[in-house]
Image (cartoon, rainbow, N blue to C red):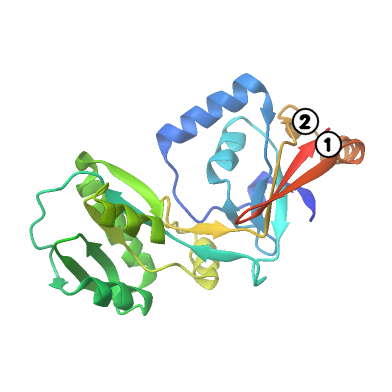
Amino acid sequence: MKISLIPINEVHPHEEYDSTLLSKIINSIRNEGIIKDPIAIEDRRFVIIDGTHRYLALKELGCKFIPSVLYNYYSKKLKIACWYRCINKAPSMENPPNARLVDREIALNMLNCRRASIAIISNDFSYIIDWSDIYNAYRLLDTLTEKYREYGISYAKEEEALKLLDSGMVKVVLAAPAINKDEVLEIAGKGKLFPKKSTRHILPYRVTGLNIPISWLMEELEEVSKRLDDILKKGSFNVYKNEEELYIFEP
């Protein structure tokens, strides 16, 4: 595990952001004067894999550097899953354009095999929209998400979303295939962005609790690096294991 200070202009997001959430994070960091958790970044092209809103907040606040944990992106221990969109109330849903009615299991299989761009699943019906490409699949998913937002949208892991549907707690699930690592890097390299909540990176470990003053991140790299090294030498990490290992820093 390596904690690094990366020049902010060398870092690239791969997803769009939520303006409301970004405003809250900017205000929180400004008021507290610290960045609590380093941002997860792919180690070759410096693509953000978790922490887009923190990155944008630090950029807005005038920071020169981002405290980061660099990950070997192609490690088998680092995986990508996705977020399914859950519609909380039953919408008035006409047959979507270019959609075909299929059985639920067929819809999920076609999604997983990339024979479908989108699956629209309820306990009464399932539609699929034929495959195009991953970028346009998520653009279409975002369009459908906004179309049904008035009925209440929440996000859940794949299996959890289907369990919520079966229990009746949500009425419809919208899904696209999981994005792979090559596609993340390709889209970021082109300067394009997937919609927010497109990827769900499952990291081999996360680091939290560093509490770095943002004033440090506006100074010269050599000075900031010394201060960060001093913090790390004096403290230690407590490790907790769940789906990901969580390294909580204790000064």
Q: Which residue is mark 2?
A: 216
Q: Residue at x 13, y 72 (%)?
A: 101
- Position in image of residue 213 (x %, y %): 74, 28
Q: Is residue 117 left or right of residue 94?
A: right
Amino acid on which the number 2 mark rests in the picture? Trp
Amino acid on which the number 1 mark rests in the picture? Val
The quadrant of the rendering that contains the N terminus is bottom right
Residue positioned most to the top:
31
Q: SS for tag 1?
A: helix
Task: Report if residue 238 is visible in the image.
Answer: yes
Mark 1 touching mark 2, by CB under 8 A?
Answer: yes
- Image position of 128 with respect to 23: above or below: below
Q: Residue at x 44, y 56 (%)?
A: 193
- Image position of 6 with respect to 183: above or below: above
* N-terminal label among 1 and 2: 2
Residue 15 or residue 204, whichever sits in front: 204
- Image position of 54 with respect to 141: above or below: above
Label 2 neighbourhood size at 10 Å, few (<14), some (14-19), many (20+)? some
Q: Which residue is mark 1?
A: 224
Residue 69 or residue 160, whichever sits in front: 160
